[in-house]
Image (tube, rainbow, N blue to C red):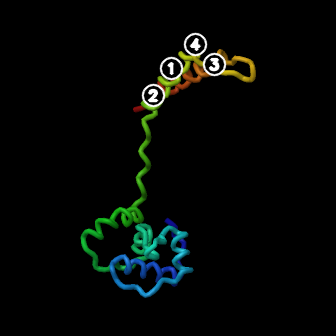
Amino acid sequence: MSRSPLTSGELDALRGLQRKKDGVQVPFVNIRDARALTALGFADRSREGWEITSEGLARLALEGDPAPARSPLHVLHDLPAITAAVEPPAPPAKPDVVERWIYLRTLLLEQLAAFETGGLQLHSGPTNVSADAMAKVRAGIAEFDALIAAEEFAAP
């Protein structure tokens, strides 16, 4: 989320969009300010006009604007955006490299078997380069197998 300062017009527009979301009749929003908010991810444009995003709500919370009285459902709906603005995001889940490698290794070995039986051939112009390609893939598989084994052995 951008922490650059908002102009007073942008902040007023953001507050107006929050009131609009809460069902309050808002006369208008300055288009220049609304476009700036859209570029920052704080507003979206729809057929019904400009609408505040969860990032916009979170920015207002960071600005220290008191949230208007809201129903518990509104608060629960906006809670992820507000807490994301306050708390650093959790690191993405690390994929299980070993499981993914086993799957990929199986596919590679199936393809190599097809090359060895002559079912597949790799050509560079008129020259069949299947044997060289198979040797490189087999060497790559062995190298990655060794990396995975070393990583599993070193893991606590």
Label 3 environment density (alpha carbons within 10 Å; few <14, some 14–19, many ≥20): some
First-in-chain label (1 vs 3): 1
Q: Separation of disc 4 and disc 1 at Cα?
A: 10 Å
Label 4 environment density (alpha carbons within 10 Å; few <14, some 14–19, many ≥20): some
Q: Which residue is identified by label 2?
A: 103
Q: Is residue 133 above or below residue 85?
A: above
Residue type at tag 2: Tyr
Q: Which residue is identified by label 4?
A: 116
Residue 43 % position (x, y): 47, 71
Q: Separation of disc 3 and disc 2 at Cα?
A: 23 Å
Labels 2, 1: front one: 1
Q: Is residue 108 above or below residue 34?
A: above
First-in-chain label (3 vs 4): 4
Q: Which residue is identified by label 1?
A: 110
Residue type at tag 3: Gln
Left or right, 74 with reference to 41: left
Badge 1 vs badge 3, beta-carbon distance below 8 Å? no
Residue 29 % position (x, y): 48, 83
Residue type at tag 4: Glu
Instruction: Assign a secondary structure to mark 4.
Output: helix
Quick one: which residue is furthest to the bottom in this view?
A: 27
Residue 84 % position (x, y): 40, 62
First-in-chain label (4 vs 2): 2
Labels 3, 4: front one: 3
Instruction: Assign a secondary structure to mark 3.
Output: loop
Left or right, 111 with reference to 25: right
Q: Separation of disc 3 and disc 4 at Cα?
A: 9 Å
Residue 53 numbered mark, or none: none
Residue 121 numbered mark, or none: 3
Residue type at tag 1: Glu
